[in-house]
Amino acid sequence: MLVPLLAGVACFCACSRLPQPPAIATDTLDPAVARLVESALREVRTAPRSGAAWGKLASVLMHYDFQKEARFSFEQAEGLSPQDPRWPYLYGLLLMPNQADAATEKLRRAVELCNDQFDTPRSRLAQWLAERGHAQEAERHFDILLRLIPNHPVALLGLARLRQSSGRPADGARLLSASLSDPHTAKSAHALLASIEQSLGDTTAAEAAARRAAELPADAPWPDPYWTEATAYRVGKKALIEDAAALMDQGRLNEALHLLTRLTREYADDDEGWYLMGWALNQQRQSAQAERVLREHLRRSPQSPKGHAQLAVALLGQQRYEEATEVLEAGVKLKPTWREFHSNLGYACVQLGRRDEAIRHYRDALACDPNYAPTLTALAELGRRTEDAKTQ
């Protein structure tokens, strides 16, 4: 009887050592987030020795306000699946804001495990090291990326930054050619080129590069299979808002509007979705549709300065200058230091033939932002027209 008894004790001890999922209160969460968290917790309870189940739970929790619980879950995932590079990689991303050294070690481990099956972990590590001043190690990783993928735009951009910071701007400029035309790096590469040309004393080239950087949309994220997999667990209102805003930054307005339509349908009481939709419609010059959406935003948030600003843009786009003036004046009362209100008031008054008022508003705009070129140009043009009228 002794052997079966010992076997039973061993079995009991082994079962008692099974890691238990963290306690997560979901009753106050966005319903979509609560459903996802509860589903991930059930998977861990069903398969507590599964690294994939723990990794999924960690990937879910890292997107919300459960950082401690996400760290615990990543540790379980790593322990149960020690050869899977996903978990140290995502864990490293989680640690970046507050535990930089630990994040670095996780990213190094991910690169080691990944064995360059794809380039993202090494690219992320190299950029992270460069940002933290570890130039020599960062350069080594950038060089490896270029051996794996010739003209890798992220690696070339990273090396160009290192060259500039080490006092070799001309070498940096020569490295930028592939990065200047790639949608993942073009904006950053032009901004860097502007800085390099300025340091080399070529003001004309610097200004041209800076103008191009300002015109370009935000750099598209570099393909990242692990992060893409993890972002599938970003759900609910906050995720929709963040994703729509990111698409708008990249100039992908139709895709943003698709998400915003869903947002205003699923979270109709949230004022931010209505505002973002109005902003996107204004960007597409769909002024009438923008007006309708922005009035809904202001119905829900009547003291919103940004709502007044965008509604005025929609009215100006329909040449309803008097109504726009009323909205802008209300906006000035809410935010008297916003240059946009004063500048657009100046424009509306010009269209209404009220030149003296327009001049006053443009001057108020310059008091808020003395270097804003469009206001300077508009005021100069209005002054020229006034002088021309006097001489006639």
Image (spheres, helix red, strand yellow):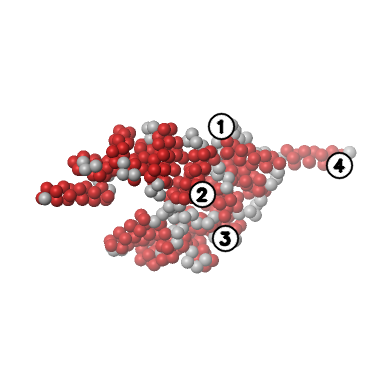
Q: Which residue is mark 2?
A: 101
Which of the 4 image quarters holds residue 166?
bottom left
Dot 3 or dot 1, earlier in sequence = 1
Q: Which mark is residue 3?
A: 4
Q: Name the residue nearer the viewer: 288 or 90.
A: 288
Q: Nearer the viewer, mark 1 or mark 2?
A: 1
Badge 2 marks a residue whose secondary structure is helix
Kindly identify the amino acid type of the residue bearing the numbered disc 3: Phe
Whole-angstrom CA distance, mark 3 to mark 1, is 39 Å
Image coordinates for residue 99, horizontal then vertical, percent: 51, 45
Q: Residue at x 61, y 57 (%)?
A: 113
Which of the 4 image quarters holds residue 7?
top right
Which of the 4 image quarters holds residue 177?
bottom left
Q: Which residue is mark 3?
A: 118
Q: Which mark is residue 28?
A: 1
Answer whether labels 1 and 4 touch (C-beta < 8 Å).
no
Q: Is residue 312 left or right of residue 139?
A: left
Q: Nearer the viewer, mark 2 or mark 3?
A: 3
Say whether residue 98 is visible: no
